[in-house]
Image (cartoon, rainbow, N blue to C red):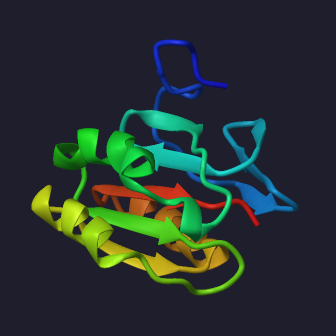
Amino acid sequence: MASPSGAPFFPRQVTIDGYGDSFFHFASMSHAGSILALPSGIRPWAPTRMAEVDPAALAPILAEAGAFELLLLGTGRDPAHLKEPLKQLLREKGLRFELMPTASAASTYNVLLGEGRRVGAALIAV
């Protein structure tokens, strides 16, 4: 869990070792619920479905936008869209982004991270 200061509960970027049944495994840890995997670390993320993604949910991503170039948005089990004003917020910070089901987003994140790419992920638990 995140500390009251909002610090990540795993303070560095690592691959996602597994996911499913509303959890993620990484760094020999397990977390129930959605996560952000950003350069500062891995932390819980409140949205449980794409309809809950709003400017407040994007705030921690936007705060780190200069540290990575591509954001992978895991949309849950099914493909989904992001509202145009939210896309604009990401673009204004210079972020490229891709939306795809969480399984694909987690796998792509792992590959790109392994290649040393500057990538972040916002993954809705499935």
User: Is 21 positioned to the left or the right of 124 in the image?
Assistant: right
User: Is 10 positioned to the left or the right of 72 in the image?
Assistant: right
Residue 46 x, y percent position in the rendering = 60, 45
Q: In the rendered image, which quarter contains the N terminus?
A: top right
Residue 36 x, y percent position in the rendering = 51, 47
* Front-lying residue, 9 or 76: 76
Q: Is residue 76 above or below residue 55?
A: below
* Front-lying residue, 28 or 90: 90
* Front-lying residue, 49 or 108: 49
Residue 116 x, y percent position in the rendering = 32, 57
Q: Quadrant of residue 98?
A: bottom left
Question: Residue at left 45%, top 48%?
Answer: 57
User: Is 9 positioned to the left or the right of 118 in the image?
Assistant: right
Q: Quadrant of residue 28?
A: top right
Question: Residue at left 76%, top 40%?
Answer: 31
Furthest-right residue in this view: 21
Question: Residue at left 73%, top 48%?
Answer: 33
Question: Residue at left 76%, top 67%?
Answer: 126
Q: Is residue 119 above or below residue 75?
A: above
